[in-house]
Image (cartoon, rainbow, N blue to C red):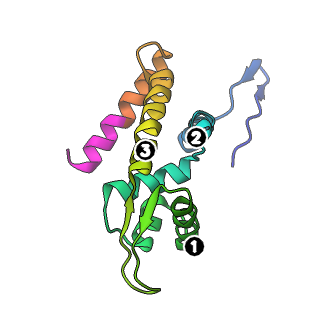
Amino acid sequence: MRENIPVTTQHGPPEPPPASTSIIVLTLAHRIEAELGAALAPLSLTVARLAVLGHIAAIPGASFSELARMGGISVQSVHTAVKSMVAAGLVRDRTARAGSASTIELTAKGRRLLRAAQQVVDEVDERLFGAEADPDRRRIGEAVMAAFRAGSGS
């Protein structure tokens, strides 16, 4: 990994360090995740928990393994998240027995929370990438959305 240390030259002021697109994008992603996390905290949600909730809503009947793959987390983490969401009344797990196909679905309370969380995400998107945001950030947001649309075939 490259260190962010100015490079001194014999003929003038230090040059900026070499840039890495990967490191810059990761740094930006961490900042966005922190901003989203802080905005979701009043709803008692984390970014990871929101992802699981959103995947359950989007794909009724998804297995724990499918939810883990979609969220990039372990199956054990999904089980833990779903168990806490069941206890909070956000989802129902109609799994008949261990090893059987799961039927996890949002409750009315879970749907309300997901709608509230989507409003929070929209507000963060607008603040970071919307009309009043820094022009460079707006362009980044537009480029990311264009790349996503191109990659998803829509």
Which residue has dot 1 on it? Answer: 76
The CA distance from mark 3 to mark 1 is 22 Å
Compared across the picture, whether 41 is left or right of 119 comes to: right
Which circle marks residue 114 in the picture?
3
Give the image location of residue 129, x and y in percent.
45, 24
Residue 106: name its quadrant.
Answer: bottom left
Can you name the residue that lies furthest to the left here? 154
Disc 2: which residue? 33
Q: Position of residue 142 (x, y in %)?
A: 36, 28
Discs 3, 1 touching: Cβ within 8 Å: no
| Mark 2 neighbour class, 10 Å CA radius: few under 14, some 14 to 19, many 20 or more | some
Residue drawn 43% across the image and 44% down it: 114
Looking at the image, residue 76 sits to the left or right of residue 154; the answer is right
Camera-near label (2 vs 3) is: 3
The residue nearer to you, when weighing 72 against 55, is 55
Q: Is residue 2 above or below residue 87?
A: above
Q: Nearer the viewer, mark 3 or mark 1?
A: 3
Relative height, residue 11 to residue 43 (above, below): above
Instruction: Give how far across and how far down residue 50 sits, in percent.
Output: 49, 49
Q: Is residue 151 magenta?
A: yes
Dot 2 and dot 3 residues touching (CB under 8 Å):
no
Q: Amino acid at mark 1?
A: Gln
**Is 124 situated above or below 94?**
above
Q: Residue at x 47, y 86 (%)?
A: 98
Q: Which mark is residue 35?
A: none
Q: Is residue 63 above or below residue 4?
A: below
Q: Earlier in the sequence, mark 3 or mark 1?
A: 1
Specify few, some or many for label 3: CA neighbours under 10 Å numbering under 14, 14-19, or 20 or more: many
125 sits to left or right of 151: right
Mark 1 Cα shell of 10 Å, populated few (<14), some (14-19), many (≥20): few
Range shown magenta: 145-154
